[in-house]
Image (cartoon, rainbow, N blue to C red):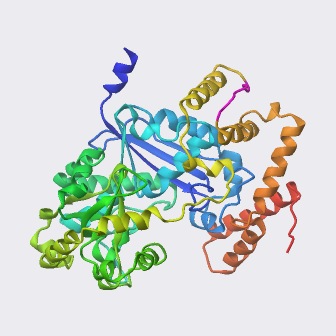
Amino acid sequence: MRKAYSTRRKPSFYWYDTETTGLRSSYDRIIQFAGQRTDLNLKPLGEPLSAYVQLPPEIVPTAESFQITKIRPATLAEQGIPEYELFGKLRQELSRANTCIIGYNNISFDDNFVRFGMYRNLLPPYEHEHKRENSRLDFLSIVRLTGALRPEGLEWPVVDGVPSFALGNVAVANGIAIDDAHDALADVNMTLELARKVKAAQPKLWKYAYTLRKQGTAKNLLDPNARQAILHVSPKYGNARYSIAPVLPITRHPDMFNRVIVVDLGSNIDLLFSSSSDELARLLFERSDTDEKVEPEERLNVNVVAINQAPMVVVLKALRQENIKRLSIDLERIERNSRRVLAATDLPRKLRGIFGARERDNQPKIAEEALYDDFISDNDRIATANFWKELKSGKSWTSSHFEDPRLRELYTRLKTKVAPQNLTKTELQDYHQFVRQQLVRTDRNLFEMQENTKELLKQESGTEETLALQEFHEYLQQLATQYDVERTD
């Protein structure tokens, strides 16, 4: 009865934003979170969730993260909640039935931080995205689709001669006040205001985009067997093209069943036929295709589209005459390139070989960063659920056993956050040593970040940025002292 009730909940959006210690979701952490549930008409449901999050000592944030957000380490220490507490709240919010999780660039950025956070805290990392009729959308992709195909009713800012889809720029262009930019709750409210304007200006497009939260439409359009060109939104195509391109689905990805390899029919497809597999691999994986200074004729755009990431795809006939001219789309060229690609019967095999041969990241990593190394077994999912059930019943800590060595490692370090009073002397020493090792990693070093902070402080900046950076520098020095870390170079 209870389960039946939960699946009959009215559909809703959960809008959210994060501020983080850097850009690497496997390493960096959320330091501020804000979320607001709305109904499908974008009216708020309940109060927003807004929280600062404590910094764990083993993480060395980037100096830029404090310069941009202007959040001070003291604020996180005094007002922040433990990370496990945040993700306990998010587990409840995001797992509510019929929730569509949405934000501004969330699928490429924030969603990965949430996944890693759930995983680190022994919570299911993916369930909130798809169980109980849940789904995801990315509002930035919807904005890009609107700007490309149905721009009427909104203003579209241009920066240095190129359309800009930065949230602040689009908001200001459309009369939305920017209050405390890079504050998570302010960004959520700004995003919601912009969403209301997009929905009001282009209700049909909004309705169509909402259907893409489920995989059916995208799966059909991206079917290589359909042999039909479609339109796809991706930042890889560049803002100069409004991030949209006519593409032809070629083949399934050799390793990931829910991904499709597509060819940009507006780019230089000659490279597909004149280059060896090794040369194509170099062009695909070593050269930056997002460089907007590179003309379409000079770039190779072979893209991988994830069906389970709510891609903005639409039939080619959605193009209007004014779109064709504004987007510099040549329909005859698309048809000519499409016939040429379809005639190359060996191309799907060639592309599968290139993507299948790409080297995977096999570098050893700590458990916190190993989410994507493997799936979690059913037995361990049950064990993690029982772990949290026992803690919620009032126990300060509980003895749990996991098959997965990653979870065993996470479990020992989670104890330092959840039940530090229960740590044995050996466990405390082990954690102290772990923190020391993390502070001097080659890829994010405490002392290098101190130097970076000093350089940023030499630049002109506002008072809030300066105070945040100064306090961050002091925080790093305190870490070095507390964990007895010294420079070795």
Give the vertical position of 347 relative to 211 (above or below).
below
Q: Is residue 274 visible?
A: yes
Q: Is residue 165 visible?
A: no
x, y (%) of residue 113?
54, 51
Q: Is residue 161 left or right of residue 422?
A: left
Q: Quadrant of residue 272?
A: bottom left
Q: How many marks?
A: 0
Residue 397 located within the stretch drawn in magenta: yes
Residue ranking furthest to the left: 321
Residue ranking furthest to the top: 1
The secondary structure making up most of the magenta span is: loop
Q: Is residue 59 left or right of residue 198?
A: right
Q: Residue at x 28, y 78 (%)?
A: 267
* Of 263 and 134, the residue lying toward us: 263
Give the vertical position of 287 relative to 116 (above or below).
below
Position of the C terminus by quadrant: bottom right
x, y (%) of residue 204?
16, 52
* Of 47 and 137, the residue lying toward us: 137
Residue ranking furthest to the front: 346
Give the vertical position of 299 relative to 464 (above or below).
below
Q: Residue at x 46, y 41 (%)?
A: 48
- Segment tinted magenta in the rendering: 396-403
Q: Residue at x 18, y 61 (%)?
A: 227
x, y (%) of residue 437?
80, 57
Q: Residue at x 73, y 41 (%)?
A: 413
Q: Is residue 112 left or right of residue 336?
A: right
Position of the N terminus by quadrant: top left
Residue 152 located within the stretch drawn in magenta: no
Give the vertical position of 383 relative to 366 (above or below).
above
Q: Quadrant of residue 329?
A: bottom left
x, y (%) of residue 285?
47, 72
